[in-house]
Image: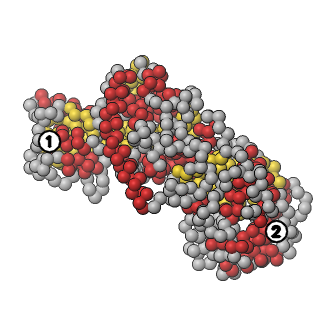
């Protein structure tokens, strides 16, 4: 273990590099990359690493970056790529293909507003595009968590019972460009944590096709298998947390991170760095005697419904803070968790920090001031935060 | 069964034991791609190959899960991804000391248009990939729409008159990438075709082959006449058969006789040209100009057919 000062972008790339080297006795590592703000520094860092039995292919588009990963994974290698915003939208077709081909590609996504009109700052709307397409999604709140989650993502993606892509998301600039201390393990520890990549359906020597025509009943079977594997990933992740702790001597955060939530009457639910801000707000309001808690959804796909339902039980009011908006609906996270609350609970959607606006403690306090007098939920409320 | 098109070459001891295209595939009768795969089987012999196929007729030919029509490991990719996915497969194969030949089999749509940026970039990186475009000029996957591969004068399902523009010179574009090897292949000249397939399989780096692939369904022509149509396209000068080494050394492999009769015959045997009113005389000036360039590039002194 050694402590290093790294941006989240560099941290993600370093985690991928350690994972890549850990597969040197296996089929190796191959990555396709293409730059886009704010994930560029991740691909730059990765390109400059020495990786025994590894290659980073510098392609001409995000679409091809994922295509290289698909080819490499279908040949049995460990794969990784990174992108953001419009790059992810451009890559989407092949992200879906990687998911449906059940290839364990790991992606670091620096969340950024989609455009034009151009905006380079944080918004969860890009990765949420792929909500329903069979990719696991994590949202992280600090650099160490991101680093650890990328390492864990390889183990999860390549687990024989999971076998699908994993996206590890960080808000652009807020995390991607913030330098903080990261506890970096030794290569030998990563070697111990990550088994060699073994993709059972990879192309070997025998005639065998990946991705040919499927009829409706075959699609149904494959969707059923994918859904079951996706739902099972919640438990697989729980097991990986134990294994992670055994090897690295620190604990990965839970799929949902609860903070002073047990006896809370009001909950603030969020994803990513807003969750860290919400925890400060909880501390401040607790000092004033308010029974407030925070719940940060770290694992968004598969959604840990049982855990969220358990934390929601008995709460009076829940503020769901989204750094995204499903136009014509409201907050995406709000839509996801709304039905998990008790029938009498007020679950109100707040939209904040769209297009990268700061979400500061006072903004969250304003939401709670708005929430407390409510006896029923209203329309999604757009909170000015910039 | 010997393939007549190969002059009896198929099914010799040199052939790959497992056919690359197995029986029971869904290709139309007279499909040029089927003939190409017979020649490939002959050229590949006992070398290991991986196939990468984007959305195109060949992807449909792969058959329905879990069967596969192809007698080799095959990855079916999204439309614009073949050359990039092949880069991934080839990279991993090389780092594991495997000398499998990674071969893209892509139609005209995935090559000329939607997949072009991917193709150009893989050529630029000089990936160790053989990219074969079986060009039936018709967007067969979607049933025959206008594209940059549609030849001048051809009708498509979305054109009310024959296409006024010439088709993109894909071979020149690929040669301009200065890749080790770029060549065009006539399925009607089997020995030349197999020789070039072998050369392309043996070379390292990015290789590009352009195959004029007769398509009775899209060309609205007699299935049995496919090879004859290709022969007419070559004879008339419409489809030059050549190879380009490192983007600079041009070698013309088959000398056309620039016959207007052959060109007229080529056009009249396909309904896609008949209704548009295109004539041999209408196409001839562009063919002549193209050949003048080829003469200059290949250093051949045999003059092109003199313009009237």
Tell me which corner region of the image, top left, top right, bottom left or bottom right, holds residue B55.
bottom right
User: Which callout, 1 or 2, points to the residue nearer the camera?
Assistant: 1
B35 up-or-down from A255: above or below: below
B272 up-or-down from A345: above or below: below
Let me know if marks 1 and 2 both belong to one chain: no
Gap in Å between the C-alphas at discs 1 and 2? 81 Å
Locate the C terminus of chain A by quadrant: top left
The crowding category of the residue bearing disc 2, from other C-alpha atoms within 10 Å (few below 14, some 14 to 19, many at least 20), is: many
Residue beneath label 1, please?
A313
Q: Position of residue B247 (x, y in %)?
A: 76, 49
For the image, the number of numbered tags is: 2
The crowding category of the residue bearing disc 1, from other C-alpha atoms within 10 Å (few below 14, some 14 to 19, many at least 20), is: some
Could you tell whether B73 is left or right of A223 in the image? Answer: right
Q: Position of residue A154 (x, y in %)?
A: 43, 35
Q: Residue furthest right?
A: B301
Residue beneath label 2, please?
B235
Q: Tag 1, which secondary structure? A: loop
The circle on residue A65 is none
Of residues B157 and A191, the one nearer the viewer is: A191
Q: Position of residue B113 (x, y in %)?
A: 60, 59
Q: Tag 2, which secondary structure? A: helix
Identity of the residue drawn at 53% across and 39% down: A76
Q: Does the rendering let one see residue B50?
A: yes
Of residues A122 and B185, the one nearer the viewer is: B185
Specify the subunit that label 2 lies on. B
Q: How is the image coloured?
A: secondary structure
Identity of the residue drawn at 66% across and 54% down: B20
Q: Does the rendering let one see residue A47?
A: no
Tell me whether circle 1 and circle 2 mark residues in contact (CB < 8 Å). no
Specify the subunit that label 1 lies on. A
Tell me which corner region of the image, top left, top right, bottom left or bottom right, holds residue B241.
bottom right
């Amino acid at each position: 273990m050694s402590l290093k000062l790294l941006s989240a972008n560099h941290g993600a790339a370093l985690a991928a590099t350690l994972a890549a080297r850990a597969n040197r006795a296996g089929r190796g590592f191959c990555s396709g990359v293409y730059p886009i703000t704010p994930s560029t520094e991740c691909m730059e860092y990765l390109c400059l690493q020495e990786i025994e039995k590894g290659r980073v292919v510098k392609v001409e588009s995000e679409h091809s970056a994922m295509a290289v990963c698909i080819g490499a994974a279908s040949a049995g290698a460990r794969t990784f790529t990174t992108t953001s915003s419009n790059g992810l939208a451009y890559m989407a077709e092949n992200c879906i293909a990687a998911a449906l081909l059940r290839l364990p590609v790991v992606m670091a996504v620096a969340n950024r507003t989609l455009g034009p009109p151009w905006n380079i700052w944080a918004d969860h709307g890009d990765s949420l595009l792929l909500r329903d397409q069979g990719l696991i999604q994590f949202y992280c709140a600090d650099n160490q968590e991101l680093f650890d989650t990328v390492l864990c993502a390889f183990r999860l993606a390549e687990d024989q019972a999971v076998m699908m892509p994993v996206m590890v998301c960080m808000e652009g600039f807020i995390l991607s460009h913030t330098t903080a201390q990261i506890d970096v393990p030794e290569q030998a520890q990563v070697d111990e944590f990550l088994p060699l990549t073994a993709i059972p359906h990879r192309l070997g020597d025998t005639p065998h096709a990946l991705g040919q025509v499927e009829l409706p009943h075959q699609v149904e079977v494959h969707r059923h298998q994918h859904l079951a594997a996706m739902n099972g990933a919640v438990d697989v992740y729980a097991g990986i947390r134990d294994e992670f702790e055994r090897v690295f001597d620190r604990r990965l955060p839970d799929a949902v991170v609860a903070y002073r939530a047990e006896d809370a009457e009001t909950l603030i639910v969020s994803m990513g760095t807003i969750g860290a801000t919400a925890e400060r707000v909880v501390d401040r309001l607790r000092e004033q005697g308010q029974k407030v808690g925070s719940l940060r959804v770290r694992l968004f796909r598969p959604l840990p419904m049982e855990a969220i339902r358990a934390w929601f039980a008995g709460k009076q009011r829940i503020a769901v803070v989204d750094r995204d908006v499903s136009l014509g609906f409201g907050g995406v996270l709000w839509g996801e968790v709304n039905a998990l609350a008790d029938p009498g609970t007020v679950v109100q959607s707040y939209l904040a920090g769209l297009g990268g606006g700061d979400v500061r403690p006072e903004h969250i306090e304003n939401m709670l001031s708005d929430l407390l007098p409510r006896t029923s939920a209203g329309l999604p409320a757009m909170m000015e935060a910039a | 069964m010997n393939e007549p098109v190969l002059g009896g070459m198929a099914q010799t001891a040199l052939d790959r034991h497992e056919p690359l295209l197995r029986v029971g595939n869904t290709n139309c009768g007279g499909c040029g791609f089927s003939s190409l795969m017979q020649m490939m089987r002959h050229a590949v012999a006992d070398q290991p190959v991986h196939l990468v196929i984007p959305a195109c007729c060949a992807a449909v030919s792969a058959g329905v899960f879990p069967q596969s029509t192809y007698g080799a490991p095959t990855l079916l990719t999204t439309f614009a991804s073949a050359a990039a996915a092949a880069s991934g497969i080839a990279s991993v194969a090389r780092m594991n000391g495997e000398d499998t030949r990674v071969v893209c089999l892509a139609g005209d749509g995935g090559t000329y248009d939607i997949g072009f940026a991917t193709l150009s970039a893989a050529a630029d990186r000089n990936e160790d990939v053989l990219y074969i475009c079986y060009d039936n000029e018709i967007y067969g996957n979607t049933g025959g729409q206008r594209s940059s591969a549609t030849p001048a004068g051809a009708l498509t399902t979305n054109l009310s008159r024959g296409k006024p523009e010439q088709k993109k010179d894909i071979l020149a574009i690929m040669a301009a990438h200065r890749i080790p090897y770029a060549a065009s292949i006539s399925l009607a000249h089997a020995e030349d075709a197999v020789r070039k397939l072998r050369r392309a399989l043996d070379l390292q780096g990015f290789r590009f082959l352009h195959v004029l692939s007769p398509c009775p369904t899209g060309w609205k022509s007699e299935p049995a006449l496919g090879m004859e149509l290709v022969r007419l396209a070559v004879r008339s000068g419409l489809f030059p058969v050549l190879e380009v080494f490192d983007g600079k050394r041009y070698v013309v492999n088959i000398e056309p006789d620039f016959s207007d009769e052959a060109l007229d015959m080529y056009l009249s045997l396909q309904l896609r040209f008949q209704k548009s009113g295109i004539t041999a005389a209408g196409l001839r000036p562009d063919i002549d100009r193209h050949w003048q360039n080829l003469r200059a590039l290949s250093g051949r002194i045999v003059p092109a057919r003199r313009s009237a």
